[in-house]
Amino acid sequence: MDLESSLSNIDEQSIATNSSIDSKEQSSNSHPPTSNIIGTHPNEIITSINPDNGYPVRQENGQRKTGPPPDWPTTRHPPGRGCEVFVGKLPRDCFESELFPLFERCGQIYEMRLMMDFSGFNRGYAFITYTNRDDAKRCVKELNNYEIRSNHLIGVCQSVDNCRLFVGGIPKTKKREEILEEMCKVTEGVVDVIVYPSANDKTKNRGFAFVEYESHRSAAMARRKLLPGNIQLWGQQIAVDWAEPENQVDEDIMANVKYKNSFFVLLFYKS
């Protein structure tokens, strides 16, 4: 739906598809042990998965969220891009009590989002956000193809962290400031609006804009709210979809490039 990339020969869509297939097989052949289920009822309110770690747990929109850490300051922003991983091919009777200790080995977890269905089973996949990028990278490296149970491997890859939406159907007479004001009224977490002038008339826009949000979650919630049939802007229907994500160069590669460039400049200077 809102969440979609690939790393280590695994892509989220294929993992989710495989998880769905595995789910049907497992649900027909087995039932999860009651002792391992935490908050199986879809509307159950859970206060904590573990009294020792104090992480709050809440369920909303078909997913169960664990986090943030109890010592995370309310004034501190959530982790930025590159801190989230996608976990697929999960056993459907696998829950936070089993997952949290495993993934916590790679670093401090900011939030875990386990996708749930109405039967009380999980949907075969989850998203885990670490407090920094290095821990997320370590998680992919160490837990991709990890045997979580006998003959059952899970898949872990970097999550797409797209924060930008494409919004079409905008009246061409609207200025950037007007579009920004309107998007801030109907959605939360708006950071910027990018508008391109018409080729024929520079006083008009091209009928669409790109809206940047402070986080992928904010963008996902905005996309859901702006889907056709849910809302109108300026009295007319709009079109909304994910904007093509920008390719991000790995920091290790960039550091290597900087090192090589500095070495080249040094040699050039000495010669």
Image (cartoon, helix red, strand yellow):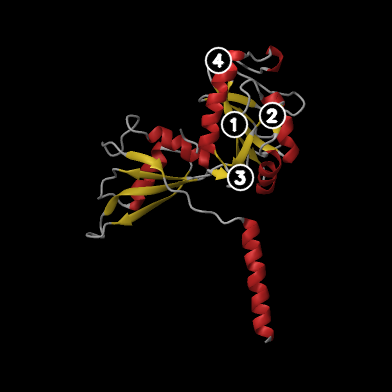
Say which of marks 2 and 3 sits in front.
3
Q: Is residue 84 above or below residue 225?
A: below
Look at the numbered discs 4 and 2 and tell me whether their residues touch, using CB distance below 8 Å: no
Q: CA distance from mark 2 to mark 3?
A: 21 Å
Question: For the residue labelled by badge 3, is the local secondary structure a helix, a strand or a loop?
Answer: loop
Question: For the residue labelled by badge 2, is the local secondary structure a helix, a strand or a loop?
Answer: helix
- The residue under the point 73% across, 35% down is 104
- The residue under the point 46% across, 33% down is 1
* Residue that mark 1 sits on: 126
Q: Position of residue 196 (x, y in %)?
A: 33, 56
Q: CA distance from mark 1 to mark 3?
A: 17 Å
* Residue that mark 2 sits on: 99
Left-right relation of 266 to 115: right
Q: CA distance from mark 4 to mark 2?
A: 19 Å
Left-right relation of 5 to 106: left
Question: For the residue labelled by badge 1, is the local secondary structure a helix, a strand or a loop?
Answer: strand
Whichever of labels 2 and 3 marks the residue nearer the N terminus, that label is 3
Residue type, mark 3 in image: Ser
Q: CA distance from mark 3 to mark 4?
A: 32 Å
Q: Residues within 10 Å of mark 2 (few under 14, many from 20)?
A: some
Q: Can residue 101 be seen in this snapshot?
A: yes
Look at the numbered discs 1 and 4 and tell me whether their residues touch, using CB distance below 8 Å: no
* Residue that mark 4 sits on: 119
